[in-house]
Amino acid sequence: MNRPPERGLLSPRLIRAIGALGLLTTAATVWLGLWVTPPDITQGNLVRLLYIHPAIAFVALYVAGGLAALSSVLYLWRRTRTMFWDRLAAASVELAAVFCALTLITGSLWGRPTWGVWWTWDARLTSTALLLVLLLGYMALRRVPAEPAVRAKRCAVAALIAAVDVPIVHFSVDWWQTLHQAGTILNPELDAHIHGSMAWTFLLGFIAITLDFVWMVAMRYRIEVLADLVGDEELEVSLAERWAEGGGPAATPVPEPAAAAAEGGRP
Amino acid sequence: MAPAVLLQTAVALAGRFPALSGVDLSVEPGEVVVVVGANGAGKTSLLRVCAGLLPVTSGTAVVLGCDLRQDATAVRRQVGLLGHAAPLYDELNPVENVRFAVKAAGLPVDRADPALERLGLVGRLRKTPVGRLSAGQRRRVALAALVARAPELWLLDEPHAGLDSAARDLLAALVAETTAQGAAVLLSSHEPDLAVPLADRVVTLAGGRVAATAPGGRRPAAVAGGVHVA
Amino acid sequence: MWRDAALVAGKDLRIEARSRVALWQVLPFAVLALVLFAFAVGPGRAALRQAAPGLFWLAVLFSTVLAVQRSMAVESGEGTRDGMRLSGIDPAGVFLGKGAAVAVQLALLQVVLFVGLVLLFDVHLKTAWLAVVASLLATVGLAAAGVLYGALSAGLRVRETLLPLLVLPILAPVLLAGSRAWSAALSGPASAGGPWLRILGAFAAVYVVVGIVLYGPLQEAT
């Protein structure tokens, strides 16, 4: 059962290029965001958080979350069922959790000076917090020991059930929140009057965060592949030990699955 | 005639552990094959694979015409598995349990009572919650459910355990009856003295593979189909 | 599928009638939770009355976890779990049947809890139909999502701790919407309950459909 290490969707060279570009753009965003751009008229220096916070939130929910849900569907659908989608889903969920946590932290950092509190039951923050818990649940489920195919199916189903809940949570929290805060809902979101160097920095921030995410997912995916390879090697050892129990190795080696299935029926 | 069970170098994993490490086995309709082997040799796993409960990861596995590598679930309703733990609900009595099994299989519910009678579950026993019955009586209830469903492949995991001698004779009679009707029986046992007389063939399992095959104690005339070398 | 669902629901309810676990354990737990919540909120009448809808639904949510665990425990023995998979019963039927049994238990539980609410929290029901409809919709949603997650964690050794962690965040919208709807039914204008009923309905519809579709693959993954 010695299969070559799986090739992902992107070549290693491309991944390295993305990583380098991500590092570059992130550094540029930091430089522009912290030093070059002027403080905002109303928000002062706090506006600098806006260069990354919405981007992180966007990536957490739509990019990472969407990728996790899509990968789970593709794994469950028989026609496209490969371990690639399972591993991608696991990697996306973990990173979604990280980005979710970062969203909450940056949001909280913005909120403390603005509202005077570390936390508020703002619709977006609450939904994001609930999303984080859902993602942690998936990660907990993933760590329950099981055979890879079983675990993959179970986690894919869990991901989909949770994904379906996300819009419901969003709407209910939104409605709940509007009841209690009549008037302006302060969201750490786009200020309508962003322009000039701030606009460019904002755009750069989006690109930087997205590139960072892609690189991280690729890395995390690679770790999953390596972990499974270790598991396969352990299986080879177990097989050898099992044969030794029965008195000597098998006469014929275990055939490739595809060939055996093609032969099928009669001996 | 197509074999009821056909396994070729079948490998089945339980977690990361290879429960079956390359099994070659075939069972013809009307045949009784007894599987013996030490603890941990893979007897239970073999039966579970044939029931479609344990996936086969490589090799060939075709049971009752269903390719287990494609879709293991299709074969399930066609086989009858009697495992170590009986599929019984403790709070319900034998009548309710067997009726549930029969209705679940889509069969008319009146098949339950004759089966219960055949297994000697009459009178007050019928209404006692299964949880309060002895192990041997629970086995009888499970067997009654099996008899009522009359599947084409019987998979019995150490069926003699917990049965008294009358029940064991009854089991032998049931096996003979069902194979005469064309069903196949795959039986695992720890007690060769009890099992071998029932068998057309005795297969020894070790380390998840077939280590040896020997003829059983049944009269050759009772075997349907030809002699099959595994 | 429906015939199988009726078969499974009947079996589960009959088992419950014999063993009475829901009656003697889940129900007292729910009432106990309500009493403890009252302690936590304090004796002030106004505070209790305002907190009542939320605490009611919180008690129902926790009871759902217990009821689902009990429902999955019926097939906890290896024999019965295999038996269910081998029986040829359509998995969607199993889902609907188990869900229906849990829903019935939850509905009866809510009736008793409501009596407790009136007694302990001094609430008065203004718009009965709103409360009843909200309860029905919420119960279907809770039972569906609960049984789905119960199946997800069934057979795992860590299931007791895993199930609450997995299912309670999912049920949060029901807590939210149910509390607001009941708040409207108890004291506020009935029209305020409208959007919440829609959320409860959407939640129930979504999870019943998701359960019918995914319960089969899920059973294979345990």
Image (cartoon, coloured by chain):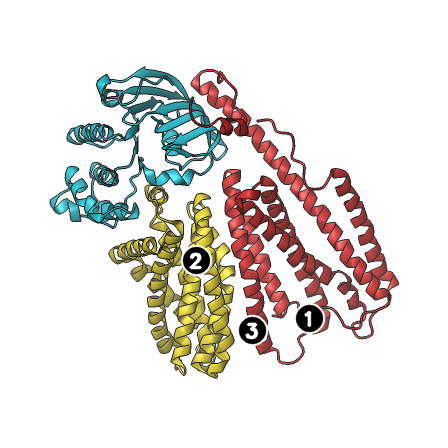
Chain colours: A red, B cyan, C yellow
Q: Are marks 2 and 3 in contact (CB under 8 Å)?
A: no
Q: Quadrant of residue C123?
A: bottom left
Q: Position of residue A91 (x, y in %)?
A: 63, 46
Q: Are marks 3 and 1 in contact (CB under 8 Å)?
A: no
The residue that mark 2 highlights is C146
The residue that mark 1 highlights is A187
Q: Position of residue A131 (x, y in %)?
A: 59, 59
Looking at the rendered structure, the kind of residue marked 3 is Trp
* Quadrant in the picture for the C terminus of chain B: top left
Q: Nearer the viewer, residue A120 or A135?
A: A135
Q: Nearer the viewer, residue A15 or A189?
A: A15
> Earlier along the polypeptide chain: callout 3 or callout 1?
3
Q: Nearer the viewer, residue C117 or A254?
A: A254
Q: Quadrant of residue B31?
A: top left
Looking at the rendered structure, the kind of residue marked 2 is Gly
Distance between mark 2 and mark 1 Cα atoms: 33 Å
Q: Position of residue B93 (x, y in %)?
A: 21, 48
On the same chain, marks 2 and 1? The answer is no
Residue B158: tell me if it is visible. no
Q: Chain of mark 2?
A: C
Distance between mark 2 and mark 3 Cα atoms: 23 Å
Distance between mark 3 and mark 1 Cα atoms: 15 Å
Q: Chain of mark 3?
A: A
Compared to residue B188, the image places residue A182 above or below, namely: below
Looking at the rendered structure, the kind of residue marked 1 is Asn
The residue that mark 3 highlights is A176
Compared to residue A13, the image places residue A170 above or below, namely: below
Residue visible at 30% across and 24% down in the picture: B34
Q: Position of residue B42 (x, y in %)?
A: 39, 27
Assign a secondary structure to mark 2: helix
Residue visible at 77% across and 68% down in the picture: A46
Residue C137: tell me if it is visible. yes
